[in-house]
Amino acid sequence: MGTDQHLQVAQEFAKVCGFAADDRVRAVLVVGSSASGTDDAYSDVDMTVAVSAPIPDRERLERLRAIGCHNIMLAIAGVDNPALPVQSQVIDKFVFRDTWFDVSYHLPHQLRFCFDYVTLIDKEDLSAHLCGAGQVYTDADLKNRVQADLRLLHARIHRYQKYAWREEWIGIDLTAIKNLIVDSMMVLNDQPNYNRHSSRITQLLKGLPNKPPSFEQDLLDILHLDDRVAWRQKVEMLQQMAAELAALCEARWGPISMFDDEDQAGA
C-alpha cells in the first residue's frame, strides 16, 4: 500500500470515526511517511489529533471497535509515562482496513513541528500556525534549541540511572533520550526541519557529516543492549555521548550553560 492508498484510508478513518462532528476534536493531520511520500507496503499511518479535552480510553475503545478496528492497544504512551516530554500525549495503535495506525492526541498548543503533514480536518486554522518545513532559524535559535536538548538529555540520563539503581525496569524508556540525541545531531548539522516522524531515522543519521566517532553503533548499542545486564555500560555510553555532543556544539556556538546557577559561580 503506497502513499495515495494510505491517505485514502486515513481520510476514511477520520470520517467514520466521527471526528468532524466531535466538538473536542479541533484538527486531524496525517504525518510521517504517508505525508512525506516515503511510505511503502510496510508503513503505518501516523495521525495526529488535536483535542481541546482528553477523550477517555473507554470511549476511544468503543469508537474503534464500532468502526471495525482490531488489534487495538490504547495509550501505549501517555500521561503516566515519565519519559515523555509531552505529558498529555496519548498514542493508540490498531488495525483499520488492514492497515496499522498510530494515532496520537495532543492539546492544540502542542502542535509545533517542522515535518511534513497533510491536513484532513482543521476547525480553527491550526495548520497556519505550524512550523513549516521552510522555517528559517537564526544561529541563536539553533543554539537555544541545542542547549535545551542537552539540558534535558542530562536529566533523562540521570532518570535512567535512577530507575536502573532501583531496578524499576518498568520505568525505563529510552525513546525520549533517543529523540533528544537525534534532535541535537540534526540541529548541529543544520537540519532543524527534519522529519521527526521518519521511520528511516538511521539512514538519515548516517548521512550527517558532523558527529561523534562511532556514533551510529553507539546509539544502537544504547538502545538495544539489555538493560538488566548492561545498564552500567549504557550509562557510561550515554554520558560519553552527551559529553561528545556538548563538545561539538560548544565548538560551533561557544560555551553552553547546562545549569541555571553556573553564571553565578563567581559571584
Image (cartoon, grey):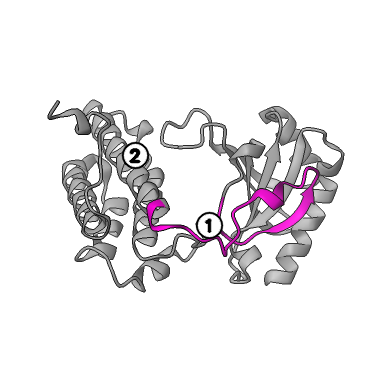
Quarter of the rendering containing residue 90: top right
Residue 121: in magenta span: yes
Image disc number at residue 243: none
Q: For the residue carrying disc 1, how many other residues have a C-alpha within 10 Å: few (<14), some (14-19), or many (20+)?
A: some
Residue 155: in magenta span: no
Residue placed at 66% from the left, 49% from the top? 129
On the image, the x and y values in percent for residue 202 come to 39, 66
**Residue occupied by mark 1:** 197
Q: For the residue carrying disc 2, how many other residues have a C-alpha within 10 Å: few (<14), some (14-19), or many (20+)?
A: some
Image disc number at residue 152: 2
Q: Is residue 162 left or right of residue 148?
A: left
Q: CA distance from mark 1 to mark 2?
A: 20 Å
Q: Kindly tell me whether residue 1 is visible in this rendering.
A: no
Is 94 in front, or is 45? Answer: 45
SS type, badge 1? loop
Please tell me which of labels 1 and 2 falls first in the chain.
2
Residue type, mark 1 in image: His
Residue placed at 59% from the left, 65% from the top? 33
Quarter of the rendering containing residue 23: top right
Residue type, mark 2 in image: Leu
Q: Are marks 1 and 2 in contact (CB under 8 Å)?
A: no
Q: Kindly tell me whether residue 118 is visible in this rendering.
A: yes
Q: Is residue 67 left or right of residue 161?
A: right
On the image, the x and y values in percent for residue 244 come to 20, 55
Quarter of the C terminus within the rendering: top left
Residue placed at 57% from the left, 59% from the top? 115
Question: Which span is picked out in magenta?
Answer: 113-140
Is 182 in front, or is 82? Answer: 182
